[in-house]
Amino acid sequence: MHAKLGALRKDRWTGLKAMKLTGMLLRLAIAYLIVIAGVAILQNRFLYFPEKAATEDVVSDGLRAWPTPEAFRGLVAEPVGSARATVIVFHGNAGHAGHRSYYAAALTQLGLRVILAEYPGYGPRDGTLGEESLVADAQKTIVLAHRLYGAPLLLIGESLGAGVVAAAGVRERDKTAGLLLITPWDRLEHVAAYHYPWLPVKWLLRDQYDSVTHLASFGRPVLVVIAERDSIVPPRFGEALYNSLAEPRRLMVVKAAEHNDWIGRVDETWWREAIDFLLTPSR
């Protein structure tokens, strides 16, 4: 009798522990689903970090509103003398175009007209954040620049901007002489999975920025620049993009550079080599 009662108590205790464990696992599962739902709803806040500013606050010496202050799409800087080409720069995911004056300083010295394109929802511009919005707007910027200045037209994309350029550039292939992609990824989902390995990012991401697919049939010169110590977009993702490209292509590695400090590790000779490849890739 006592043995039976002991067995019953043991079975009951085991059952209670199993119920507690099941309840805990259920609560964890619910919490995980809530986190996933929150990330899915708020994912733009993980990818886009726009800084709003008035037009007069983003212009500076040598940079004027482009094409006009009223129809602001970015900033433009002109070289001394006639421009041998026009470069449109699409910046990374934070700040605004006015923070990228270093491109104008470097490239106007090489005889290039430089347009620092602004995204919808950034700087003085209204608009919607997201891949569809940014890429469609970039196409309009490319078309307008080509209409105003003609060829050759080069596109530079940095980080997020590289994803924008890969999509918009191939859609406007006939107007684009070449692409310079700085700290790019191959596919956004790979970078997201690297930073958030516990999330099913493949199923959550609305914006794909699949540069491998976009550039598969581009057929123009592409220069990929990776930062050797990049912890935000690790070099392997830029290398994967480069390996997927057809010729003419080139890979440049900025030694000892992180994602945001590469600009301080390159000089005029580096820029000249990069631009010369895009304008005369057979040399």
Image: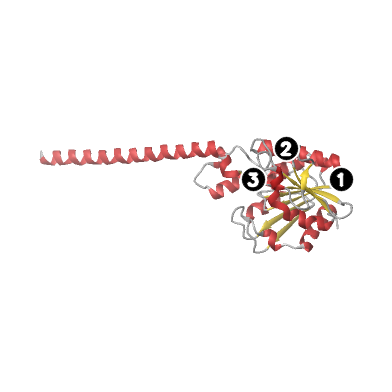
User: Between tags 1 and 3, which lies in front?
Assistant: 1
Marks 2 and 3, the one that precedes in the sequence: 2
Relative depth, front residue between 229 and 125: 125
- Mark 2 or mark 3: which is in front? 2
| Element marked by disc 2 | helix
Q: Please tell me which residue is depicted at 89% across the width and 52% down the height of the picture.
A: 82
Residue type at the position of mark 2: Asp
Mark 1 to mark 3: distance in Å? 29 Å
In the picture, measured across the screen, residue 95 lies left or right of residue 86, that is left
Q: Secondary structure at mark 1?
A: loop
Residue to which mark 3 is pinned: 187
Quadrant holding the N terminus: top left
Tell me which numbered mark, 1 or 2, is placed earlier along the sequence: 2
Query: In front: 241, or 40?
Result: 40
Q: Nearer the viewer, residue 239 or 8?
A: 239
The amino acid marked with disc number 3 is: Arg
- Tell me which amino acid carries mark 1: Ala
Count of labels in the image: 3
Quadrant of the frame with the C terminus: bottom right
Mark 1 highlights which residue?
151
From the top left corner, tell me how far across and down residue 173 is, in percent: 80, 41
